[in-house]
Amino acid sequence: MIAHSADLTLIWAGVIAFAVAAYVVLDGFDLGLGILFPFFPEKHDRDVVMNTVAPVWDGNETWLVLGGGGLFAAFPMAFAILMPALYLPVFAMLLALVFRGVAFEFRWRSRRRAHWWDASFILGSIIAAFFQGVILGAILQGVAVDGRGYGGGAFDWCTGFSILTGIALVIGYGLLGATWLVMKTGGALQAHARRLARPFAIATLFFIVALSAATPALEPGYYQRWLSMPNLIFTAPVPIAVAAVVLLLFRSLARGRDEVRPFLLALALFGLCFLGLGISIFPYVVPVRVTIWEAAAPAISQAFMLAGTVVLVPLILAYTGYAYWVFRGKVEPGQGYH
């Protein structure tokens, strides 16, 4: 029974990690479009930008629900610790996502006030992305634990490191959005998106290096995990792969004929960063205080929830894949959502 419970805990940790990664991948470029909106001041360009994601944007947030709900159900102790520690940034992120969704719909209907809804879309996207990064940074730097609950203050999450991760995620999402537009648009708009992708790629690389340098100083365990021997032998390929992907990304952006590859390379860069995050914190769900096994729900509860998850997740993946397949290809001016 103990081994079975441990196996279920690992499976649920994988499910939640997958949900978070899927959300970052799918909603990342979506939020990135809002972050890039100020760089496309013309209304016809903004219409095309929004139409590239209009058929799929709301479905992208499904994975956020799965990640948060899965944490609550499968790791209730972790949820009980992390939520009080992160109430304010989580509330700000959710409010920004709601406001952004309203703005997405209303800008098409309220023509006289479209500029206000555009501003709301921009602010909602930036605030949501920023606080997602803040939440990540606050979890990575560690939270105070008192028994089975949170033992810190309401603003412990607000540190220099968490602010840095917040800005980094805004920039990274901007890179995803720019490369998405390179893939989904053509002509002058695509050329402008390609030009935007380069500085966003440079800034993303800067923040990756800065955060990678700062993370080992947060906890001795991070330093041991990454820089001590023999761990260094196994962790060194990650930064090497990051450097290779960045080099390929810049080469791809320099070639006018590469349209899909920049987006795939940007996704690969995010994937490597996510892998690095996993190396840093596993097996902790509250770094470095509570492991996934200490926070896990009873095995019977995990098994019951998993029975539904193995049915629903493939259905969601199939629907999502079908939606992207149906709406594949370039988006031209005058086409799409109205």
Image: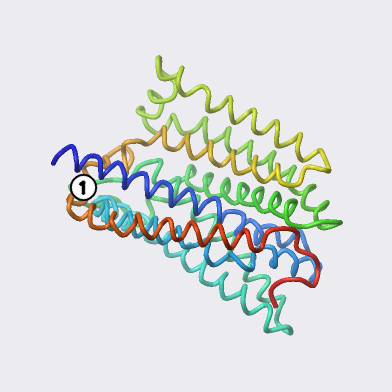
Q: Quadrant of residue 47?
A: bottom right
Question: Left or right: where does residue 39 sit relative to residue 206?
Answer: right
**Residue 165 x %, y %:** 52, 45
Residue 198 in sight from this viewpoint = yes
Q: Quadrant of residue 216?
A: top left
For this view, does 323 lie left or right of residue 314? right
Residue 272's place in the image compared with 131, above or below, is: above
Q: Is residue 41 visible?
A: no
Viewer-proximal residue, 264 or 242? 264
Disc 1: which residue: 146
Q: Position of residue 181 (x, y in %)?
A: 72, 55
Can you give x and y, in whole percent of width and height, for residue 91 in the image?
42, 64
The residue depicted at 72 percent of the width and 58 percent of the height is 329
Horizontal side of 254 relative to 274 (left or right) equals right
Q: How many marks?
A: 1
Q: Quadrant of the C terminus?
A: bottom right
The residue shown at (40%, 15%) is 230
The residue depicted at 32 percent of the width and 52 percent of the height is 82
Q: Amino acid at mark 1?
A: Asp
What element does badge 1 sit on?
strand
Q: In the rendered view, would you say 218 is above or below 27?
A: above
Residue sitting nearer the eye, 27 or 133: 27
Quarter occupied by the N terminus:
top left
List x then y, in percent, for residue 51. Answer: 70, 67
